[in-house]
Amino acid sequence: MPVEIRPSQALKLWHDVTLDLVRDGETDLTARQMTILLTVYLEPPPHTVRGLAAKLGVTKPAITRALDTMGAMGIVDRRRDPVDRRNVLIQRTVDGALWVESLGDVIVKRAKGLPR
């Protein structure tokens, strides 16, 4: 069932959710990091540095820098592909899955509060 909201409501929702994320004081992701994280958790694997770079239209070093930060947070992990050692596989973690689930909860809560 599609949800219909006005552009002003969509912007308000985006504002409120990002404000909640900044205020929580824990994981504060950039737009690039958020896109990488949601791609890894919402789209079927495998995910590689090369594949993420192509999808986002950025360089592999840009993806690597984002993954360095996200790896330090424990929300993704990287492993060499055992089949093709040139590839680096991006893997989900339990902490990352819990964080994404929590993000979904924040979005739902904020969406319920949108003016009709």
Image (cartoon, rainbow, N blue to C red):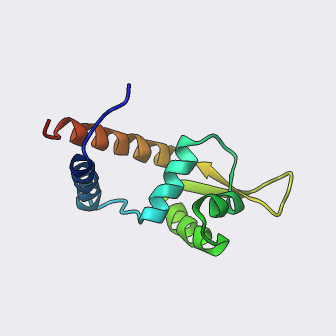
What residue sits 64% from the left and 74% below the top? 61
Q: Is residue 93 visible?
A: no
Residue placed furthest toward the left = 115
Q: Quadrant of residue 103?
A: top left
The quarter in which the N terminus is drawn is top left
What residue sits 55% from the left and 54% below the top? 76
Indicate the position of residue 7 as horizontal and vertical percent values: 26, 49
Q: Is residue 6 left or right of residue 55?
A: left
Indicate the position of residue 73 as horizontal and vertical percent values: 47, 61
What residue sits 32% from the left and 32% below the top? 3
Judge whether 112 appears above or below 93 on screen. above
Total tally of numbered discs in the picture: 0
Residue placed furthest toward the top = 1
Given residues 107 and 80, the one toward you in this image is 107
Indicate the position of residue 74 as horizontal and vertical percent values: 50, 57
Q: Quadrant of residue 44?
A: top right
What residue sits 64% from the left and 72% below the top? 59
Judge whether 40 appears above or below 68 on screen. above
Indicate the position of residue 77 as horizontal and vertical percent values: 60, 56
Given residues 91 and 60, the one toward you in this image is 60
Residue placed furthest toward the right = 83
Given residues 10 and 99, the one toward you in this image is 10
The quarter in which the C terminus is drawn is top left
Q: Quadrant of residue 26?
A: bottom left
Q: Is residue 3 visible?
A: yes
Q: Is residue 80 left or right of residue 42?
A: right
